[in-house]
Amino acid sequence: MSTSAVDGPVLNLTRINREHMGEYSCVADNGVTPHKQRAFIVEVHWHTFRSFIKLPVGVGP
């Protein structure tokens, strides 16, 4: 997977598979320091037809 910028509170990942499972890092950078960073785990639950996962994007308190 490649990195990209996301606008909004939800990151929708499509066309992922079991090989994409693992720990990822989300960095919030709006030009004001300090930047926020949070790690999260992606688990892929699949069916024989298709798989998808929706993750909230953002930095908590």
Image (cartoon, rainbow, N blue to C red):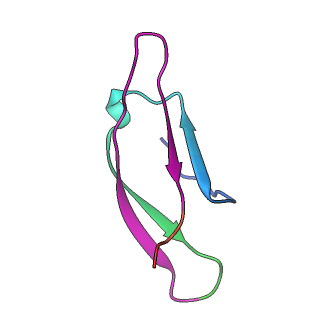
**Residue shown at the point (62%, 87%) measured from the top left:** 32
Work out whether residue 9 or residue 5 is closer to the camera in this orientation and state it: 9
- Judge left or right: residue 22 versus residue 56: left
Vertical arrangement, residue 58 with respect to residue 44, above or below: below
Asked if the stretch drawn in magenta spans residue 43, the answer is: yes
Q: Quadrant of the C terminus?
A: bottom left
Magenta residues, as a range?
Answer: 33-57
Residue 48 is situated, as x and y percent measured from the top left of the image, at 41, 10
Counting labels gives: 0
Q: Residue furthest left?
A: 22
Vertical arrangement, residue 59 with respect to residue 45, above or below: below
Residue 4 is situated, as x and y percent measured from the top left of the image, at 60, 53
Residue 25 is situated, as x and y percent measured from the top left of the image, at 40, 60
Vertical arrangement, residue 60 with respect to residue 41, above or below: below
**Residue shown at the point (46%, 62%) measured from the top left:** 26
Q: Residue furthest right?
A: 7
Work out whether residue 42 or residue 25 is closer to the camera in this orientation and state it: 42
Q: Residue furthest top?
A: 48
Q: Residue furthest front?
A: 61
Asked if the stretch drawn in magenta spans residue 51, the answer is: yes
- Judge left or right: residue 2 versus residue 42: right
- Judge left or right: residue 25 versus residue 50: left
Work out whether residue 6 or residue 51 is closer to the camera in this orientation and state it: 51
Vertical arrangement, residue 55 with respect to residue 13, above or below: below
**Residue shown at the point (69%, 59%) measured from the top left:** 7
